[in-house]
Image (cartoon, helix red, strand yellow):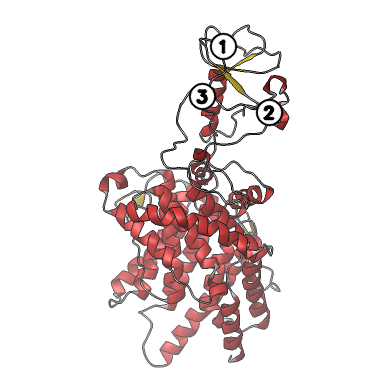
Amino acid sequence: MSCDPCRRYHYKCDGVQPCGRCTRVGRTCVRRSQHRFKHARVADTTATWVGIPNELRFVDEDDDSPSNAPSTPGDETASGIGAATFIPTPACGSASEDGVYSAAGAGDTPHSHEPYKLRSVSAYPVRDEQSALLIRHFVRVVSQFFDFCDEQRHFARTVPERARSDVTLANAMMACAARHLSLTEGLDRTVADAYYQKCLEAFIPAIATRVDNETMLAVTVILRFMEELEVPITGRDSQDHLMGTQAIVRTYEQHDDIQADPSGLLQAAKMAALRQDMYMSLTTQRPMMLTRRGMLPPTIEGVPRRWSDDEWANAAVGHCSDVLEYVFSAEPRSIDQYHVLQAANEEWRLSKPASFAPYYVDHSPGAALPNLNFVADWHTMGSMYNLLASLLLKAHDPTLPRLGPSRRIAVASADEEIRKSTLTMAGIARSNPDTHSALLVASMAIAMFGDRLTVQAEQQAVDHVLEQTQAKCGWPTGAARQMLQTAWQCV
């Protein structure tokens, strides 16, 4: 049977509502449902989801006889959309009994339009409360470690939508979320291991054949973050996924056509990879392995042109990577290059938009740490990376006198400036608790320069920041705290 003007297949039900485009009571137009399912596939959070009856029968438009679609006994009496059950096709990447998602079968495509098959709109139909919790935790918490300089929030928005059709990305999300929860909330760590193994089963063959893929880069930086969280458990940092991100980014650098028109997710993933490389450069005191080519907003003769606030923040990140490359380079450091970097650091502070100024500042005389509140994550983190670059430049100033009393005076002055900047970064992290990554960057600064602190109240304050970083972010700070305790005892 067909209904004009749709003239498409219908499924029978015992309802009494017409399809809305014809007057045949008791029929619901499949074409109308398909359109609504289609639009629900894309990143449209306002789309209306179509309810599915408990039992379905498909009727051919020519002879009104049951088609070869699956059916079960008693479908003539089935009703009640709220209790619908749905058995997905292999292309859905459905969950197994343990809640781990498997890849679609060979040859299955989620966008197939076969008339007698009802396909899922999602590659990860959430089947249990645990999986739903992990996806929600990634979107609401873990994504902040990637999106703090991104107004579009690609890891909180685009990545979950991509994961609807990519079970490798979905398993990476849930593995990372589970590892974070195991370190912060005591979740059984075997949960993360299970999702991680499922992710690798599909990821390793895929990355071996196709590396110029932005989704693969997103998976790799997510797994790299999980790898960083593993350090206190394994006792070493294998950097396996860090090398993977470097390989993918270098592949993109060889494709000028891709560089000319990069997608938002690609840019976000590349910036995340750059920041991960910066972390390793600082903690291991080695040169940068990645360059920032194609990662930062364009300039005209070095002058920014209509940068958004998050682009200003990313410019501070890029400048900090230049400073790290200068500080830890195997090549001799040029004084002229030092002056260029020092001028760039100051220029960012003087030229940044007024929105980067904290809306509240309080540094009471008796307080060990100042209080500086910022409006958005990128305002907080842009200021943090600029301060970190400033600290590195002060600690590696080649213009300091080499000998004599003047050197002692100059070093003492530099140490005092480093002390104040370190306390400022710790204060920013403490007074902006919703910006989780501020704790990470502050912890890096404290680990590198906290030995300059000689007042016990200041030492206790920064030690508390390190403690909070591990408790709230799951980030390993135990070794840094022990080293600082030893250094403070020697003062």
- Position in image of residue 238 (x %, y %): 45, 71
Q: Which mark is residue 64?
A: 1
- Position in image of residue 448 (x %, y %): 51, 77
Which residue type carries mark 1? Asp
Farthest residue in the front direction? 73
> In 3D space, how far apart are the residues under numbered discs 1 and 2 (Cα atoms)?
21 Å
- Position in image of residue 277 (x %, y %): 42, 65
Question: Is the N terminus in the top left, top right, bottom left or bottom right quadrant?
Answer: top right
Rendered residue at 28%/76% (across/down): 331
Which residue type carries mark 2? Asn
- Of mark 1 and mark 2, the one earlier in the sequence is 2
Q: Is residue 19 above or below residue 257?
A: above
Q: Which residue is mark 3?
A: 116
Q: Is residue 150 left or right of residue 77?
A: left
Q: Which residue is mark 2?
A: 54
The 10 Å Cα crowd at callout 2, few under 14, some 14 to 19, many 20 or more, is some
1 or 3: mark nearer the eye: 1
- Of mark 1 and mark 3, the one earlier in the sequence is 1
Q: How many marks?
A: 3
> In 3D space, how far apart are the residues under numbered discs 2 and 3 (Cα atoms)?
17 Å
1 or 2: mark nearer the eye: 1
Question: Is residue 371 among what the camera can see?
Answer: no
> In 3D space, how far apart are the residues under numbered discs 1 and 3 (Cα atoms)?
14 Å
User: On the image, which quarter does residue 343 sit in?
Assistant: bottom left
Give whichever of 96, 196 is nearer the camera: 96
- Of mark 2 and mark 3, the one earlier in the sequence is 2
- Position in image of residue 244 (x %, y %): 39, 61
Rendered residue at 38%/82% (across/down): 400
Rendered residue at 62%/29% (across/down): 49
Question: Is the C terminus in the top left, top right, bottom left or bottom right quadrant?
Answer: bottom right
Secondary structure of the residue carrying tag 1 is loop
